[in-house]
Image: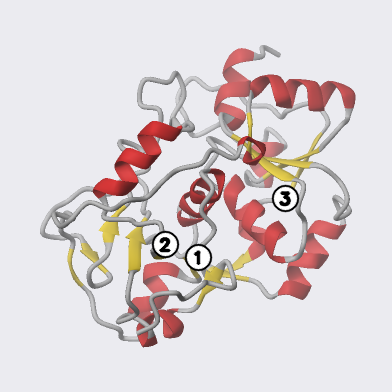
Amino acid sequence: MNSNLNLQHPIVSVDWLHNNMEIENLVVLDGTINKVFDENQTQIPKARFFDIKNKFSNTSGTFPSTFPSEEQFQKEARKLGINNNSNIVVYDDKGMYSSARVWWLFKAFGYNNVAVLNGGFPAWLKRGFPFEVMRPYQEKEGDFTAYLQTEYMAFFSNVEAASKHHTHTIIDARASSRFNCQVPEPRAGLRMGTIPNSVNLPFTDLLENGILKEKKELEEAFSKLADKENAIIFSCGSGITACILALGAHIIGYSNISVYDGSWTEWGSLVKE
């Protein structure tokens, strides 16, 4: 098989993955958030668990799932047997939820040969493709090298300036009921609210049954809020689903985009009403 495969598109179908499982240097990552190893958990054959919460986040940080250091990301990626020539496909068990965060993290650390499995594990199972009991990766370490690309992430000071000076379009991926303060935030103790001068595009608007919509529909969703020349910061609850908006925007040609790492959990905690 071709070890020099270059994933030309940021998403692949379950049929594509099933037909290419024997590609040399293919690495399938399970990016499901809050998953644990037990006999009831299943995975795509030979998948490796990409533990966002405990391995690929700054676990000493104040807020959940925040950006890891270059050193930490490289170390943990190598532990998963990821190499500089790996062909990475990442999925999650929701269809498309946290897998886009994994895709974005790799891009933020300088690696582009990575794609999201469209429809994730549910779409895989729906097609009747094989699965196995989840198991930890215990094989050879990889030689992956991380190169931090700072423009992919936005932090509190960046968003504060963008909100105040209108330098970016800030797009919030939370449900409209949360954005419009109609329901409490799911995180205990976190106030309701929005980042000043932000607009709303729920990440679910880009999906249908966990499948990313076609380009035309993505174009329609984004064109109402920002031109392709605009600088955009995507936000959400804790920096996970904002990456779905980043994925959709990237596919249709938006290039000046970043994800607010702490998102509303950070903003709502640090900025009082």
**Which residue is labeled 2 in the image?**
90
**Residue 142 appears left or right of 165:** left
Q: Are marks 2 and 3 in contact (CB under 8 Å)?
A: no
- Relative to 220, does residue 181 appear above or below in the rendering? above
Pick the front one: 187 or 163:
163
Q: Are marks 1 and 3 in contact (CB under 8 Å)?
A: no
The mark that comes first in sequence, 2 or 3, is 2
Front label number (1 vs 3): 1
Based on the displayed image, in which of its 4 quarters is residue 265 positioned? top right
- Relative to 88, does residue 162 appear above or below in the rendering? above
Residue 101 x, y percent position in the rendering: 50, 49
What amino acid is labelled 1 in the image? Ala
**Residue 11 appears left or right of 172:** left
Q: Residues within 10 Å of mark 2 (few under 14, many from 20)?
A: many
**Which residue is labeled 3 in the image?**
201
Q: Which mark is residue 115?
A: 1
Q: Residues within 10 Å of mark 3 (few under 14, many from 20)?
A: many
Quadrant location of the C terminus? top right
What amino acid is labelled 3 in the image? Leu
- Number of residue marks: 3
Residue 216 x, y percent position in the rendering: 78, 74
Task: Identify the residue at horizontal 30%, vertical 84% (top origin).
Answer: 129
Q: Are marks 2 and 1 in contact (CB under 8 Å)?
A: yes
Task: Identify the residue at horizontal 54%, vertical 38% (top origin).
Answer: 148
